Image (tube, rainbow, N blue to C red):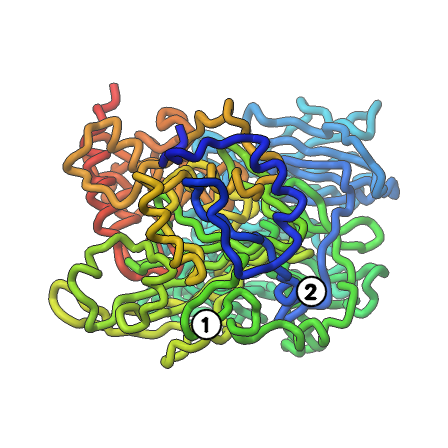
Amino acid sequence: MLRGSVKRCPIIVSAFLTMGAFAFSIVSPAWSNGPEGAWPRPEKISSDTSKLLGSPDPLPLETEPAFPRLRFERPVTIAYAPDGTNRLFVVEQHGVIHVFPNRPDVDRTSVFLDIREVVSRDHNEEGLLGLAFHPRYKENGRFFVYYSTKPRASVISAFRVSAKDPNRAERDSEEVLMKIEQPYGNHNGGSIEFGPDGCLYIGLGDGGSANDPHGHGQNLNTLLGSILRIDVDHRDPGLAYAVPKDNPFVGREGARGEIWAYGLRNVWRLTFDRVTGDLWVGDVGQNRYEEVDIIVRGGNYGWKVREGFHSFDPDAETTGDPLIHPVVEYFRHEGMSVTGGCVYRGRRLPEYYGAYFYADYVTGNLWALRVNDRRELTENRKVARTNLNIAAFGEDEAGEMYLAAFDGLIHRLRRRPGDIGALAAAFPRRLSETGLFRSTKDFEPCEAALPYDVNVPLWSDGAAKHRFVVLPQGRSVQFHPEHAWEFPVGAVLVKTFFLPRPGASSALLKSPPRLSTKEAGDSEAWRRLETRLLVHAPDGWQGYTYVWNDEQTDAVLIDGAERREFPVPGEQGIAPQAWYFPSRSDCMACHTPAAGFVLGLKTPQMNRPMTTDFSRAAEATQAARTEAFAEPPNQIAAWREWGVFADPPSESTFELPAFPDWPVTAENLGREELERHARAYLDSNCAMCHVPNGIVGRPDFRFGTPTSKSQLIGVNPGQGSIAPAGSKLVLPGDPGRSELWHRLETLGPRRMPPLASSVPDATALRLIEAWIRSLPPAR
């Protein structure tokens, strides 16, 4: 049921359908009480948001679908067969390879190979991960794949194409070349490519977990943490391949001859420059830095002594070989997981000929760099912000470049139209210039502001928040019963964060972290920290952070990330609290495509009583409103009545899901209510990444997924476990041996949620602990 009643104000369809003619056309400060007893509604609920639809740092390139009629499930490799047919092959992580003609209008694919029955997808980084065609594929029909299997191992196998059908491989032709045991489910690497020398190069991770617990990166006696080079056309005794005699560690005591280079954490995509023969890799970092390397024979790339250019564990054992610097690194405010790309050798973008492209899987940022003949960096610039989870780059036979993303599409790059310099100059650098506030000094939102609140807010180190939406003129919101609502291009979501002043009263500090417009304007009690905007621009959703000045009169747009400390009152008196102001890339790490970009504005969150004022202009109606209603109306009902929705829910659909209200006292709840509150909290704080086709994927933290199907209870932890040995993600009855509880309780790089939080959520910890203790033991 809708939470919150509307006494004496029935939702009558005819009453709000007539509003559609004017609801999105005129901006006015006036307010109307409507019929007797009606909740006050804004006279107009839209505004001109065009100032925010450009960019403060417009980039020269953008993506477009290369094959708009094709969609794939978690594509992780794009390749071509060197046979002159101009076909492309796309690898899906679950174990299928598709083939199709390289035409923009192609509307179907053929399944080239299906090995799902042997591929393990128990962990997010496992699966069918690599594909490489033999340089003489046209003559011998051989190709090679890399996949994960059970018991946990990485397999490199050879297959042959069917002699009768060039679009189908012979499934029973598999010849296993290598089977490498893996201690954990992450850092599987998986990229394989043939070099100009005809040898197969294989990228491996360090075996997984976190901190390279077994020291594989600096151990030449293991294949893990390395790039291998093998000869697939010959065999050594006892092997299904040969070790080339000129490999750097052949004959070295205590070293594996297959190793070409080492000291790598998790090679996610390697590629050869088809002109120079240079081998490029993206190596995924751990805590702070992502890196791109050019690989040389016998090179030691530093992990885990070093992460990027920086010390990580200087006391770790090493081989004594000199450490090779990366070509470039980037810090975590730009992204969290590098995707190695390729050197562009096509014709569509001649100005980028010879540039190496790479991306970040989490944020969708994309860069192009250049090196000179001595492999020294001469240029490195961000060229696109894509909002895509880019998993791989690939080339076709002509050298044109493609990007595989987890939206299911294969993309390519094109030049961005327009004058990007003029776009940058026009973007508002101050909050007062955005048109979203009548007065920033008085914290007076614009007349078209639609305030809202959510049932279970994202944890933000105890900060109070004020939220509203501004819709563009002539546009509306697409309602969905369960998943995120769809907002039109031009919509702006506005959220301001506050910390209490040192002199704030104790009663004020105990109030829920939700502020009405009037309370938010009380700068004597609350310090305005930042206002974050989530803007649906023509090229996708973008996030911006405006930091408030000390005078609390305005806020200024920041270009990167910042960290400051503020004095905050607490039980032990005044103490400094760190606050992280996120970069634009940080914003999009949570507002993911898999989550629908918009997080709080979905039915289970919005299905609650309206608890916040609209603007100072509405204060005059407060007394009448309080008299007319025993309790506030439901937010969805109010938005429905005002004509906010393009396809509003009918009365028959008002049996809608709702999260329980927050905060909660766990001690007062039974087992079912504990689970309901716990799952709602995990949905609000974790499901933007832990969702099918999300950045992390499993477990599935969506509230609507039954706990029994969430892959949460009794499941082994995956990446970088910090709980004691033998723990599970959730071990019924035992929070101390549940990875989930430890991830919420800890600080540092393994903390969840991972971004912009340095204070554990004590209320959530008590709730999750009580829920885990209440779970019956597995049978």
- Residue 31 against residue 607 in the figure, above or below: below
Q: Is residue 533 left or right of residue 1?
A: right
Residue visible at 59% across and 31% down? 14
- Residue 613 against residue 434 in the figure, above or below: above
Q: Is residue 308 left or right of residue 374?
A: left
On the image, numbered disc 1 is attached to which residue?
440
Question: Residue 237 placed where, x, y %?
Answer: 57, 39
> Residue 37, which numbered label?
none
- Residue 384 against residue 394 in the figure, above or below: below
Residue type beneath disc 1? Thr
Q: Residue furthest left?
A: 572
Of badges 2 and 1, nearer the viewer stands 1
- The answer, for residue 77, to whether it is visible in the render is yes
On the image, numbered disc 2 is attached to which residue?
356
Residue visible at 30% across and 55% down? 513
Residue type beneath disc 2? Tyr
**Which mark is first along the chain, 1 or 2?**
2
Q: Residue furthest top?
A: 779
Q: Quadrant of the N terminus?
A: top left
Q: Quadrant of the C terminus?
A: top left
Question: Residue 53 placed where, x, y %?
Answer: 65, 62
